[in-house]
Image: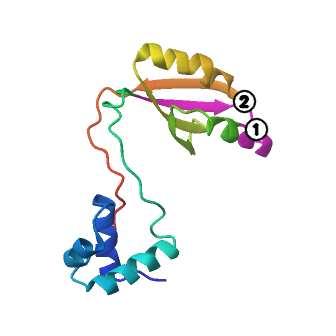
Amino acid sequence: MTLDETDRRILRVLQRKGRISNADLSEEVHLSASACHRRVQRLETEGYVRDYVALLDARRMGFPSTVFVEITLTAQADEVLEAFEKAVSRVPAILECHLMAGTADYILKVVAEDTEDFARIHRQYLSRLPGVAQMQSSFALRTVFRTTALPV
């Protein structure tokens, strides 16, 4: 399926306002409510819309600290990568894990209450991840820009 400009308008609105009613969405994208509903259903079925979520404020939820952790593994064998990825997906404070090209094998985005909480996360979880040879942690001082919206 290829996206036309109407599909793109729908996706742009849904990325900003996931809870918008179909009536309001159809008005914003200049479609009838039934045509808009059919398009949204098609975009969902085709996998363009993966999910609808509530984005929580990390600071208000008690996690004002963001830490990026670069991980270097002992080896690049499939079993080492799979064991690491399986274990890292079970750590509640890790929001993202990316396999990297470059000096680090993975980069993790971790949230914590403060430096003491991160030390606990490091001791309890990160230092126990399988296959880890080296870790480098960097604390974000301030988030300058953040979005979940893809360029459509």
Q: Between disc 2 and disc 1, whose residue precedes?
A: 1
Position of 53 with respect to 121 (left or right) is left
At x 22%, y 72%, the residue is 24
> In front: 132, or 147?
147
Contact between marks 2 and 1 (CB within 8 A): the answer is: yes
Residue 104 x/y as whole percent: 58, 35
User: Which residue type does callout 1 highlight?
Assistant: Val
Magenta-highlighted residues:
66-83
> In front: 116, or 22?
22
Residue 75 located within the stretch drawn in magenta: yes
From the image, tell me which residue sits under label 1.
80
At x 40%, y 22%, the residue is 113
Q: How crowded is mark 2: few (under 14 residues within 10 Å), some or many (20 or more)?
A: some
Residue 49 quadrant: bottom left
Residue 144 located within the stretch drawn in magenta: no
At x 26%, y 73%, the residue is 25
> In front: 2, or 51?
51
Residue 37 x/y as whole percent: 36, 80
At x 30%, y 73%, the residue is 22
**Relative to 109, is 21 above or below?**
below
Disc number at residue 130?
2
